[in-house]
Image (tube, rainbow, N blue to C red):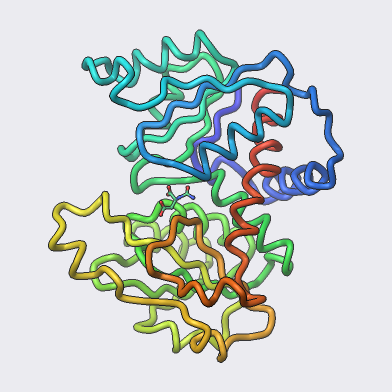
Amino acid sequence: MQHIISIGDFDRDEIDSLLNHAAQIEKKKYDTNALAGRILAVLFFEPSTRTRMSFESAMARLGGTSLSVGSVEACSMAKGETLADTVRVVSGYADAIVIRHPKEGAARLAAEFSTVPVINAGDGAGQHPSQTLLDLYTIRQSMPVEGIEVALVGDLRYGRTAHSLASALSLYNARLHTISPKGLELPATLAAQLKEKGMEITEHDSIDEVIGDVDVLYVTRIQRERFPDSASYFNVASSYRITPELLAGAKKRLIVLHPLPRIDEIDPRVDESPHAKYFQQSRNGVPVRMAMLMQVMK
Ligand code: NCD
């Protein structure tokens, strides 16, 4: 039984072959009944639009069905049931579980109690492996991932998409530039692990310092829901914004990615720019998650 909890569960060859499979799927080369009769349980304890709907869309396109309890308030967790019990029960109703939870480590715990494969769709400030796979897929559509220079911008402390992506990029000899408000830097333990793997990471005060050098500008939202109080959020809110003027100094091949939702990090005028790939990125969630679902349920 194969769980997908962290991007570290994959080596580079495994990532590449999954993304090759996703590319075939995108060209409509797949069996629309590949997962007929299979059921995916969608267990989301945090808001989601893209991740949830693209997993459900992926399942439907493969002939399968998705089940969910609806809102957290509507399920027995609200009566005090433990996550372990919920997962034990739900794994009796489905062939795989995709879970999102506000606590780091929740997906790993779920996997311990599940009798079917578990996919982590975001565990607090931890990991978000399916997002990283679609991020890499989107990069590959524009350029080879090997050796690229990537600027990670925004909330690198609480942003799980940034954590997973940084780890994955270390497999491709990428160079990392980080730009974040004070206090929201990449966690020191993660930065140390990446450096140990030979990754070069440089911190910068502003995006202007690197805009001419980078191939990917990966922008993230300040993760307001992880802040201890609203005052500390408002201290750092709106501290950076990607504009067409900023992008005027970029390399021709630079792509702007954002896992979305965006608040005010990207000026809507950027949407028309050939650099903007974030809506393409969100669409890529479907073929990539189709490949993931086939991998864990076939
Ligand atoms: C991200 C998440 O939930 O971590 N969203 C997503 O899955 N596309 C990013 C975010 O919420 O800021």
Percent position (x, y) of residue 209?
A: 45, 88
Q: Is residue 136 left or right of residue 260?
A: right
Does residue 131 appear in the picture of this structure? yes
Percent position (x, y) of residue 244?
A: 53, 84
Q: Residue at x 55, y 29 (%)?
A: 3
The C terminus lies in quadrant: top right
Q: Residue at x 67, y 23 (%)?
A: 297
Percent position (x, y) of residue 269?
A: 52, 77
Q: Residue at x 83, y 29 (%)?
A: 31
Where 176 sits versus 262, above or below? below
Q: Is residue 127 left or right of residue 66?
A: left
Where 134 sits versus 113, above or below? below
Q: Residue at x 49, y 14 (%)?
A: 91
Residue placed furthest toward the right: 29
Of residue 115 and residue 82, the one placed in the foreground of this image is 82
Where 261 sits versus 237, above or below? above
Percent position (x, y) of residue 112?
A: 43, 21
Of residue 11 and residue 103, the one placed in the foreground of this image is 103
Where 83 sits versus 288, above or below? above
